[in-house]
Amino acid sequence: TLLFLGCMSSFRVKESASASYELLKEGNFDFKIFEKEPCCGEYVYSAGKLDFAKKIFNENFELFKQHGIKNIITTCGGCFYAFNNLYPKYLQDYDIPVKHVIQVIHKLEKNGKLKFQQSNDTVTYHDSC
């Protein structure tokens, strides 16, 4: 399983990336990350650069296959959208299941692998993209 952090978590909301990493480790979830993570291509696609986006999709899929990636977890809503919608649309053989990290954290908590303490803090979850 690949933890794909994405541009948003890697550069703009870094605490999301580190918190996701720590929670997955704490829950003994087996995953790897790329030392040099490529862009998923969603922003390029959204900017209307379809040929360039398809090139990125193809290169990433080849990279995933080279590394034996069977599942992807992402912290980024844009990457989640790209991997679930754009990659299957433009890549004929793309077949890698993708989950958002919150889905995995929820399952770890539900299965007793993560424990959270009760809090009186107000929490907001932004379901992006």
Image (cartoon, rainbow, N blue to C red):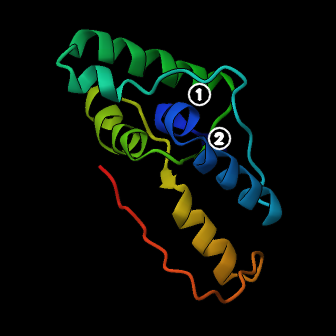
- Along the polypeptide, which appears first: circle 1 or circle 2? 2
Image position, residue 37 (x, y; %):
61, 24
Q: Residue at x 60, y 41 (%)?
A: 14
Report the front residue among 35 and 13.
Answer: 13
At 56% from the left and 81% from the top, the residue drawn is: 121
Vertical arrangement, residue 21 with respect to residue 109, above or below: above
Crowd rating for badge 2 (residues with CA inside 10 Å; few <14, some 14–19, many 20+): some
The image quadrant that residue 43 belongs to is top left
From the top left corner, tell me how far across and down residue 117 is, in percent: 72, 85
Give the residue at x 28% y 27%. Answer: 90
Q: Residue furthest front?
A: 121
> Is 36 or 55 nearer to us in this picture?
36
Circle 2 SS class: strand
- Spot occupied by residue 69 in the image (x, y as percentages of width and height): 64, 36
Q: Residues within 10 Å of mark 1 (few under 14, many from 20)?
A: some
Q: For this view, does 6 lie left or right of residue 36?
A: left
Kind of residue indicated by mark 2:
Leu
Q: Quadrant of the N terminus?
A: top right
Q: Quadrant of residue 115?
A: bottom right
CA distance separating discs 1 and 2:
9 Å
Residue at the spot of label 2: 2
Residue 64's disc is 1
Q: Is label 1 in contact with label 2 (beta carbons under 8 Å)?
A: yes
Which-is-in-front pick, marks 1 and 2? Answer: 2
The amino acid pointed to by label 1 is Phe
In the image, is 55 to the left or to the right of 51? right
Nearer to us in this view, 102 or 29: 102
Q: Secondary structure at mark 1?
A: helix
